[in-house]
Image: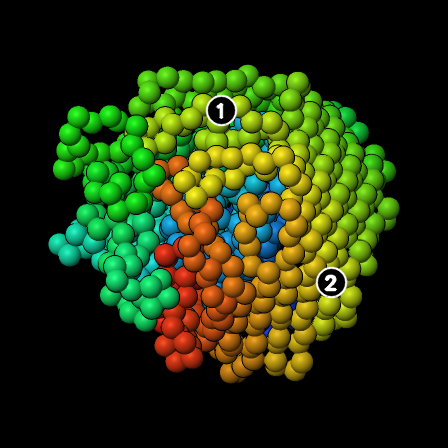
Amino acid sequence: MKKLLAILLVFISYQAVYAQFTSQGTNGFGNSSMNNSGFPDPKSPKTTNQNSKKTGRAALDDSTRLKYGPHSVYSFKEDEILNGLNAKNRPDTSLTLFQRYLYTEKSGFLLQDLGNQGTALRSIFWQSPATIGVQSGYNAYLPYAFQTKDINYYNTKSPFSDVEYYLGAGGQTTLRFSFARNVDSLWNIGFDLQRMVSDKNLSDAAYKTGDKTLTGQWGLVLHSNYQSKNKKYRILGHINYFDQGIKDQGGVKLGNLTALDILKYSDNAALLEDGVTESNDKFIKFHVYHEFQGFKGLQLFQMIDVENRKIQFKDMAFQSNLANGFYPKTYIQYIQAPDKDSLYNEIQWKEYAHKTGLKGIYRGFNYQAYFKQRYWSAFNAVENASKDRFEQYVGLKLKQSFGQKYDFEAQGEYLIGSDFFLNAKLETPLLSVQAKHTSASPSFVSTWTYNTAYRWDKKFENIVSDEIDGSFHFGKKSTYFNPGLTVQSITGIIYFDSKTNPIQTNELLGIFRPKIETGARWNKWNVMANVYWNKQTGPDVFRAPELIFQGNLSVDLQYKKLLYTQLGLDLHYNSAYKAPAYQPVLQQYFIQNDLELPAFAQVDAYVNIRINRVRLFFKYANALQGLLGNNHYTAYLHPAMYRSFGYGVRWLLFD
């Protein structure tokens, strides 16, 4: 892996020697009011040939002299095309929060993992379902994969590359490489590649023999988009491959120490001490979106999705880990239990879907009406049995814009005979408010599981939730203050109890969560803060901190319009709560009642740098650990990464 990264970086460096590195702007800190973040000015004079007024395939002429940069490349997402938005998103060149490279950091610290990148993720706060219909429920690693809604499709005047490389403590290494180029003015092709690895921070038998790898992941997207010369037809598509492997450690082994005392030490043993427990989650997806525009008020669109996924888990030391309490029971009736036995779980998930409909825009009114069919099947290799379901949906979305500042949107979708959701949203310069009502099927993993340690075949009622989320927007050019409130009520919530068995409660869970998002810029100083206060009533089945605070303080420095530097501190605080434990067999977090994780504050010191088109950061993470207190847990028995140094680089190449 290190050789591969070294070769790639040398190659990129060689190519970059010939890149154009002018710097005509006045600021490099990502302030939209500043001039182009120090990149070439798109309004600067340029020479064009005699064919510069041509359109269609002839418009792309390599002999045209351009100062390529962020102004010569733009991207758009599928949802923007579907909703009739003429989006042209330029590459990000900001230094603001550039040092937040881990997935938990990018989420604003609202995701929880097991202390190391690549481990199982969970939202800190309860989230209403994003889609209706039966979903697999094996979601712990999916946030690391490329998401259809987030894939960028490009239009470039020259080959465009975006290279990211990050290295943190515990071998947390991430390489991302994106490339796109126009075949001609109508057709663009490209790919996104991600490689992510990390090392074990707990000791097991494999670690002692030199096998320190904890996680290894590959992600690859091949994408393309095309628009006809008369702009009546457009097609976007991609192939998405994901392969996530992890050698589960189960958390820290306590021995004779308490869970809090063991945080004083950094050389702790793993609970799954044999080092022969592994999880793997891989899929390949094919997605196409295309549309035909008869005229603006009447257009046809269609989406096609095909997915093939395999979820696997194995523990070759099942008997010993059963004895230490990691598993609740075994369904095998031994005459005499062997010294060693294995646990295996495998689900093969297949899905086929299409969504076909009409859409249009007329004088600020936007509509979509569609029919959707979806078929899924799940095969359990242990039981040698399968289940499937054919689902049919109808949906309608209406949006009215009043000028450029006021929008009202209403949307509904109905899974015939089962699920539905209704959503209404109002956007104004002063207020944003959204109301949502959802009735969603329980996940597949909660209704059917069969392996040596867990077996059930259950029927649960739909999970019904209501949610209102709103916020005010106050501020001026250099300040903002956005107070908000989220209110949720959930009936029929399904949770996994302390034995990792799925339970549905009919009691009403109520969530009341005020929040404040604020920030200011004064001269060279920047300050940002987010505060969440979370109160819950009803059954104690989803646990979250009562108070979360996130703050950032930074100062911008500049040297001769060439070197832009940002020095800063990141602060993250969680109040005490009984964070859930994690069971890798099912990819599920579950209730634990043994330990309340103490409140903690984490401070990261960093410096962000931009030189022309290259951005770098150097970060000292968890800087106060060991100085003001011991380390902390991110989940039950999973310590956070100890005080450590990390760095990263991101390089944009435009020719």
Closer to the chain start, of discs 2 and 1, is 1
x 67%, y 64%: residue = 517
SS assignment at label 2: strand
Given residues 533 and 230, the one toward you in this image is 533
Q: Quadrant of residue 455?
A: top left
Query: What residue type is disc 2 on?
Result: Pro
Most extreme residue toward the front is: 335
Color encoding of the figure: rainbow
In the image, is 533 to the left or to the right of 92?
right
SS assignment at label 1: loop
Q: Which residue is mark 1?
A: 458
Task: Report how far apart the C-alphas of labels 2 and 1 lie in the structure.
Answer: 42 Å
- Residue 527 seen: yes
User: Which one is in front in this view, the residue at disc 2 or the one at disc 1?
Assistant: 1
Q: Please, is residue 573 above or below residue 543 in the view?
A: below
Q: Are marks 2 and 1 in contact (CB under 8 Å)?
A: no
In the image, is 544 to the left or to the right of 370?
left
Question: Where residue 382 appears, x then y in whole percent?
Answer: 31, 23
Question: Where residue 77 appears, x then y in whole percent?
Answer: 59, 42
Q: Which residue is mark 2?
A: 483
